[in-house]
């Protein structure tokens, strides 16, 4: 059972554009949603996170939009840079310690 | 930037051999997690500890996998008899206190290849 789904599987944008990465979940007990950025050969790095009491979280060029009713969230990366090219994972937790990860979106930013 | 240290970065074993990897969590992080990330980018939670005590583990780790987090020593994950399907990136994460364990910071991983 895939509890956290991500789309698209891969995304290509031009430098300066906004990349939109989508995530949805099934378990209504999930209340914490971190996004991780992973470069090849490295571990995932925590990028930004949101708790279910909020509908938006912003950190520089990265913004999470959260819709609790629809069980959907999205990560917007504005002014995308080639250095943002990586795989992005949406994860979820219900406070039960372990994170449930989506399958990732591979982002390519063309210069 | 995460300060979780994992060694070795790469590990090559034959089928049936033991494979052991180590993790030093961020200083002051009481909870340590092990995940397996396969070549399809699927993450599988294996086990977690708070201080030296196991909090949760999946059934798989009760058979060929063992893990420990002794005081004043690195945490470790060991596969007793490696199988080809164990080839994956093994990630250690540690958790910031007071967050219920869900804010997790990952190390660079140990990439295991079982020939």
Image (cartoon, rainbow, N blue to C red):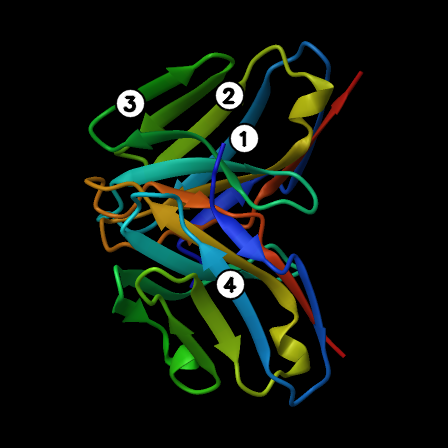
Please identify the residue farthest to the front as the structure is shown.
Answer: B72
Q: CA distance from mark 2 to mark 3?
A: 13 Å
Quick check: can you spot residue B40?
Answer: yes
Residue under numbered circle 1: A21
Q: Which sits earlier in the primary sequence, circle 2 or circle 3?
A: 3
* SS state under label 4: strand
Q: CA distance from mark 2 to mark 4?
A: 35 Å
Image depth: mark 2 or mark 4 in front: 4
> Which quadrant of the figure has residue B85?
bottom right
Residue under numbered circle 4: B22
Q: CA distance from mark 3 to mark 4?
A: 38 Å
Q: Against A4, is B56 above or below?
A: below
Q: Residue at x 66, y 71 (%)?
A: B87
Q: CA distance from mark 4 to mark 1?
A: 33 Å
- Tag 1 and tag 2, C-beta contact below 8 Å: yes
* Disc sitting over residue A55 in the figure: 3
> Do discs 1 and 3 share a chain?
yes
| Circle 4 Cα neighbour tier, 10 Å, few/some/many (<14 / 14–19 / ≥20) | many
Residue B46 position within the rendered picture, expressed as x and y whole percent measured from the top left: 42, 68
Residue under numbered circle 2: A76
Q: Against A84, is A52 above or below?
A: below
The quadrant of the picture occupied by the C terminus of chain B is bottom right
Q: Which sits earlier in the primary sequence, circle 1 or circle 3?
A: 1
């Amino acid at each position: 059972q895939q509890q956290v789904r991500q789309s698209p599987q891969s995304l290509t944008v031009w430098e300066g554009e906004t990349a939109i990465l989508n995530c949805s979940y099934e378990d209504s007990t999930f209340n914490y949603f971190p996004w991780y950025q992973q470069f090849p050969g490295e571990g995932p790095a925590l990028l930004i996170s949101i708790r279910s009491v909020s509908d938006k979280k912003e950190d520089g060029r990265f913004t999470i939009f959260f819709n609790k009713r629809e069980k959907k969230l999205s990560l917007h990366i504005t002014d995308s840079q080639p250095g943002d090219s990586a795989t992005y994972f949406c994860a979820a937790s219900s406070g039960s310690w372990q994170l449930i990860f989506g399958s990732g979106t591979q982002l390519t930013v063309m210069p | 930037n995460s300060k979780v240290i994992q060694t070795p970065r790469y590990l090559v074993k034959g089928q049936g051999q033991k494979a052991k990897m180590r993790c030093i969590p961020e200083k002051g992080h009481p909870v340590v997690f092990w995940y397996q990330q396969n070549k399809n980018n699927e993450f599988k939670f294996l086990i977690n500890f708070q201080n030296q005590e196991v909090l949760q583990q999946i059934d798989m780790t009760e058979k060929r996998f063992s893990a420990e987090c002794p005081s004043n020593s690195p945490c470790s994950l060991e596969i007793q008899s490696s199988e080809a399907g164990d080839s994956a990136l093994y990630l250690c994460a540690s958790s910031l206190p007071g967050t219920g364990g869900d804010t997790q910071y990952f190390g660079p991983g140990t990439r295991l290849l079982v020939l």
